[in-house]
Image (cartoon, rainbow, N blue to C red):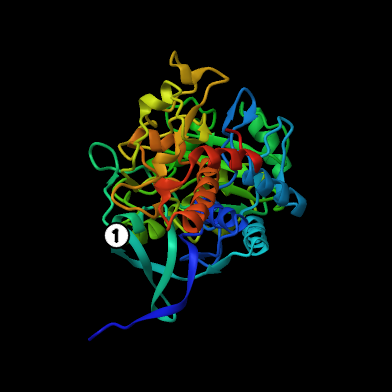
Amino acid sequence: MTLTVRSVEREWDVLVAGGGTAGAIAGIAAARTGARVLIVEAQGSLGGTGTNAWVTPLMRNVSAGQNLNRGLTDELKARLRQRGDGAVDANGNDNWFNPEGLKFVLDDLLLGAGGEALFHTHVVQPEVTGGHITSLIVHNKGGLQRLHARTFIDATGDADVAALAGAPTAGGDADGLHQAMSLRFTLAGVNTARLRDYLGAQGQRQDSENFLHFWMVWDRRSTLEPLFRRAVQEGVLLERDGDYFQAFSVPGRPGELSFNCPRIRADLHDGTDPWHLSAAQLDGRQAITRLTSFCRTYLPGCEDAVVGVVAPMVGVRETRRITGDYVLTLTDILDCARFEDSICRNHYPVDIHSVKGGARLLHERDGTAPYFAPDAYHDIPYRCLIPQRITNLLVPGRAASSTFEAQSSIRVQQNCHTMGEAAGIAAAWAARDHGGTVRSVDVGALQCEMRARGANL
């Protein structure tokens, strides 16, 4: 049988593979720069981790008390607040958001910029000539289709396009193990005032019933650990259910909590393996049943709670990473490295969710390295977005060029926003002025443009 690939009789300046955290922002930025933009997305909405994996709130990335990720990130937060789907707590943390509201905000931003999205569409194969991508073959209900563009952005999160195009990649730690995956969910119908009072009595004081945050990790001195030990002894939870437990309030959804768990069992850790992903969905839902029973039984205010949302997408922290023109390292982070081609600043800690058991590795908030100063940060260079061997491809987000340890620091959503914004502007310029070649972009001009759009560089 011969498979037929139909060429779409259009050409875009910038084609973004993956409309997730980095890809949606990249597409918006490229469209605002005047490019004809198409975002190809496997799910039915933009936002990826922040919407379809329900990763909320955004993790803080600050230096000297100031947000390091600005530009489109600021606009995103402002629009969420206007909708009632974002909020700022009493400590000035403006990272609280409703994933469902984020879908609508991203739609408005992309359409307002003149960009297009093609949903329910999967990457099959880039077509490459002499290290230059000429088109991308995709699959959807219309069958196999060939999409033409000048410059491409791989925002799949897994470096799918880069790997298929022949660019070198790496994945996992020295043993080939990836960070733990999660399947997030929510509980609705929670009496947050009662839960706030209980948590406060347990030593996890809450500033407001509208901004709850509580947690438990074995052997990390959580005041909720005795409760978890009791639940394990009584057969409500498994031992591994206490490896990581965390919950947050969600703006615009009163009485609902978002859980940054359950952690998927350790042998299911490769987000590029469809069998791992499928088994993770099943394992996660079974764990959600246990955690829901735990909350109803042991946490005052949760007696009548029901499952509100189960994320349609498994939460994946790390899979493939490109080997780019520069590879960011742990030393770069701890020494607060500066680069002439910086396109993002970061001060989020090295945060490895290990599948090897026990506490997370290298997750420290203080130390003697320069990075632990309150006004410290390091740069992420533009070269980390450029895969080796390919001329017209950029890879922003969690698949950017870095070591396993460094990736655990730069992977958070706000950094993905900023890398995506840089990639979108650069891709638009490359398509317009350089035949798609991303290495020809004037990075100094890119930095000036990003600052003009509000970036903190």
- Residue at image position (64%, 64%) is 111
Q: Which one is in front, 408 or 377?
A: 377
- Report the residue that reaches farthest toward the bottom: 1
The residue to which callout 1 is attached is 164
Identify the image quadrant of the N terminus.
bottom left
Provide the secondary structure element on which disc 1 rests: helix
**How many numbered callouts?**
1
200 left or right of 125 in image = right
User: Picture coordinates of residue 429 (x, y %)?
Assistant: 51, 53
- Residue at image position (56%, 60%) is 35
Is 379 above or below relative to 401? above
- Report the residue that reaches farthest toward the front: 433
Q: Is residue 174 visible?
A: yes
Q: Which one is in front, 169 or 92?
A: 169
How many neighbours does mark 1 have within 10 angstroms: few (below 14), some (14-19), or many (20 or more)?
some
User: Picture coordinates of residue 328 (x, y %)?
Assistant: 37, 34
Identify the image quadrant of the C terminus.
top right
439 left or right of 103 in image = left
User: Picture coordinates of residue 406 (x, y %)?
Assistant: 39, 33
Q: Which one is in front, 315 or 73?
A: 73
- Report the residue that reaches farthest toward the top: 368
Snapshot quadrant of residue 177:
top left
User: Picture coordinates of residue 139 (x, y %)?
Assistant: 39, 74
User: Which amino acid type corresponds to the residue marked 1 in the rendered image?
Assistant: Leu
Is 187 above or below relative to 12? above
Q: Is residue 236 visible?
A: no
Is 293 above or below relative to 369? below
